[in-house]
Image (tube, rainbow, N blue to C red):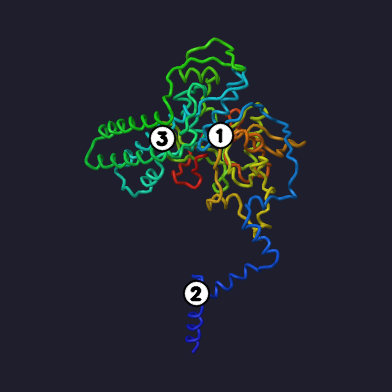
Amino acid sequence: MKKTIFCAIALSFCAIAQAQTDITPDVLQALRGGYAATPTDRALRNALNNNSIGQMAVNQENAQRTDTHFSVEVKNTGISDQQSSGRCWLFTGTNVLRNRAMRRLGIKDFFFSQVYLFFYDQLEKSNLFLQGIIDTRKEAIDSQTVTWLFQHPLSDGGTYTGVADLVAKYGLVPQDVMPETYSSNKTSEFSGHLKRKLREAGILLREKAQAGASERELQEMKVEQLKTVYRMLVMAYGVPPTTFTWAPKSEGKPLTEAKKYTPQEFYREVCSGEEDLYADYVMLMNDPSRPYDQVYEIDYDRHVYEGHNWKYVNLDIEELKPMAIKSLQDSAQMYFSCDVGKFLNRSTGMLDIQGYDYESLLGTTFGMTKRQRIQTFDSGSTHAMTLMAVDLDAQGKPVKWKVENSWGAESGMKGYLIMTDKWFDEYMFRVVVNRKYCTPKVLRLLEKKAVKLPAWDPMFAEEE
């Protein structure tokens, strides 16, 4: 009898559990209780049906005149515009160098050519992909590495290490020596064609390898494929100069006699290029989803095959801030990246988690921590900018930060964004500082062997 009763109860529980795996009529009826259809609910529904959620969520209680005073600020002039491209990493990197070049040249109006470096970035990434296909030719085409390569043959996004490796190899040229083109400002259309060509080339390399081709034959085939890539890049972005003649100008007038340069000579002269943009700089990360005080490296996260994978030191946010502040106090701007889309008021240029009240508007809560947001792909580093200012209180603690963006002068606060320190804590991910501003602890950590993570790791993201 007891056994019969127990079995009946067990079957009942099984039936309930099974029923709740689907949205049955009974479950749907229960779900309908989540919307009470009160006058307030109906008013909000009508408003949301006809307006942007972001506009309606603006927190009026937090609305106030933006405080634009910063106790520590590295001044600069001119705002760049990456337009419809994912080259924020490149604009940010060259903008940091631009500030240094303007001081050295004694001018206030100057930009490096982003399309010059981008041309070589796309050429080098094409080689990285094709060489990756050769290196993995013995793996199955559906292996995780080969699958990832064919999914990501090329991108216009990147990181600081790409800037460092490309500048070291190819130098820099002024913007007027190699100006932007339609395709460089709007990269997606041409990039789609180039990706298709690379995938085709990759398949042909694998077929040639499977037919018994030697390493030398595969390399010769790759070079022929890269000739096609080079021609396509020239058609879209122009011919990158190997030498040029240039003089700094003020109000359109040359300040010195024009001089002939190679791109590498120009970089060394105008940026005091004795330093190593890779070896002399450290990328600091705040990723609470991984242990702190550890060095990490992302495989295949580089722009040049023989270059450097993205390597970073993971730190608690409060350990990271003093090094950034020390840099700014010494008039050194920094490469900086974050999850820029979160709580951004595009009209005012403010990044403030108190600026929007989505919870009251939508009648729920959003309680994930930074760690949980990373683990669930809800947040990650999406955009690079130039960190240029911090406002400190009487105790020397940061209140807010300022960045130079690359979305044009009409965006945000005349091209700049201001973030509260609380927003910085939650959505800042990377900052690149010179070794001389690093703590002894960080320098010791850099001596450790990096933990290598796969290219598909959740924190792999190229800033766009």
Mark earlier in primary sequence (1, 3): 3
Question: Which amino acid, mark 3?
Answer: Lys
Q: Position of residue 33 (x, y in %)?
A: 62, 71
In the image, residue 140 above or below residue 173:
below
The residue to which callout 1 is attached is: 444
Pointer 2 local density, CA inside 10 Å: few below 14, some 14–19, many at least 20: few
Q: Depth check: 163 or 240 in front?
A: 240
Question: Which amino acid, mark 2?
Answer: Ala
Q: Position of residue 390 (x, y in %)?
A: 69, 34
Q: Is residue 156 left or right of residue 252?
A: left
Q: Which mark is residue 125?
A: 3
The residue to which callout 2 is attached is: 19
In the image, residue 166 above or below residue 39:
above
Between the residue at mark 1 and the residue at mark 2, the CA separation in whole angstroms equals 57 Å
Question: Which amino acid, mark 1?
Answer: Arg
- Helix, strand or loop for disc 3: helix
The number of numbered discs placed on residues in the rendered structure image is 3
